[in-house]
Image: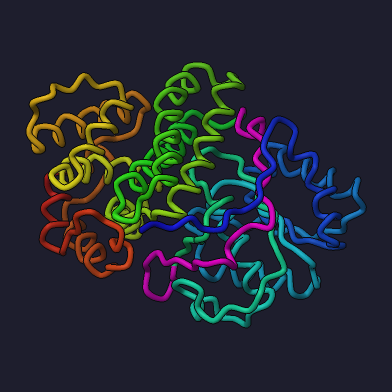
Amino acid sequence: MFNITSKAPVLFGKGAVEQTGAKAKEFGWKKVICIYDKGIKAAGIVDKVLASLKAAEIDFVEYDGVVPDPPDNKCEEAAEIARKANVDGVVGIGGGSSLDLAKCVNILLTNPSPLSKYYGFNVGLNPVKGAILIPTTAGTGSEVSIVSVISDTKNNVKVGVAGEACIAKLAIIDPELTLGLPVRITAETGIDAFTHGLEAYTSIMAGHYSDLLAEKCMELVAQNLPIVLKEPQNYQARENLSFAAMLGGMAFTDALTHLGHCIAQSMGAVEHVSHGTSCGLAAIMILEYMADVVPEKTRRIGEILGLDLAEDLTAEELGKQVAAGFADFCKAAGIPTSLSEAGFKQDNLAAIAKLVAAEPMLQVAAPKKADEQQALALLQKAF
């Protein structure tokens, strides 16, 4: 048994962002809040969106206070601006942080604060007004997912708000917006997309449909990320990565991420390392750890990475080789492959392991779960 869930409608392709205003008008919106970070504004991307809104005679207010791993108080701050402006909808522009914050603002427009009341899945939410989500990276898949990940400032942990209220009214994916991405962000978001495919593929909730999406996601990243890192202006490779990120988001919406993202979010909460780096490090750990329960899929991941794997490998040998192959893929992309290389403090490993064990719902789809001691052993081995 497996899920095929509702997906956000998608407008995909070169120049798609120019349709933002027309689409908002189709929805009957007269005023929106545009949510983004200062870097996206400086890159000139926001101006394209605002020009499209102006051309369609859509009024707007702006919020540029997005920061990485957006904290709940930023969501409340932006929502208050949106409420006072009496907007009809939300337009999120940027990476996963901007899109996740935009989803939360959309929720808070029709659901009273505080946001903490809605942590979890479909927790007593009223219908939302709607959001147009415009990614400027190729990694998170947030534009098509049913979850928003934010930072709970009271408990210093990452939490999720999930369910139908997080589904975009429209995702506008314009690969041209990723052409100016710095190499480091391109690499980190590409690795993030691959791990979405990897975890959805190995999930106990995986099915025929999510497997199709997940495999294609991993294939496109494996083939195109090395090209983009050498040729940043290669539009076709950029388009393929944007498509991969979308597929990854759709795959884990159905099958869910699991132990890798549980470890990654716990590492991010303690060490505040980038999400893509955390996901890459965690994937190296779990590929070896779970190979004994998903050997066929572990082999397929290795094949997607271009590994030549002997037919008579034991599950343990298979896990080691595929984990090493993925580590090589990360290394070639400039992503750290050990916790020490990423600047982790060994004294923090126990705290990370405790968080992993404290989030059982993040492991619900894991083919092999990890308690606190098992998580600590994985972290120590990866150090």
Q: Residue at x 8, y 38 (%)?
A: 316
Q: Quadrant of residue 211?
A: top left
Residue 213 % position (x, y): 45, 40
Residue 152 % position (x, y): 44, 70
Q: Residue furthest front?
A: 1
> Which quadrant is the N terminus positioned in?
bottom left
Residue 243 % position (x, y): 55, 35
Of 215 and 117, nearer the camera is 215
266 falls in the magenta region: no
Residue 151 % position (x, y): 45, 65
Q: Residue at x 17, y 59 (%)?
A: 370
Q: Is 5 drawn above or below residue 290 in the view shown? A: below
164 falls in the magenta region: yes
Q: Judge left or right: residue 71 versus residue 52.
A: left
Of 36 and 132, nearer the camera is 132
Q: Judge left or right: residue 132 versus residue 255.
A: right
- The colour scheme used here is rainbow
In this rendering, the count of numbered labels is 0
Q: Judge left or right: residue 355 versus residue 44.
A: left
Q: Is 174 drawn above or below residue 102 in the view shown? A: above
Q: Is 280 drawn above or below residue 37 in the view shown? A: above
> Which quadrant is the C terminus positioned in?
top left
Q: Judge left or right: residue 335 versus residue 184.
A: left
Q: Residue at x 10, y 61 (%)?
A: 373
Q: Which residues are magenta?
A: 152-179
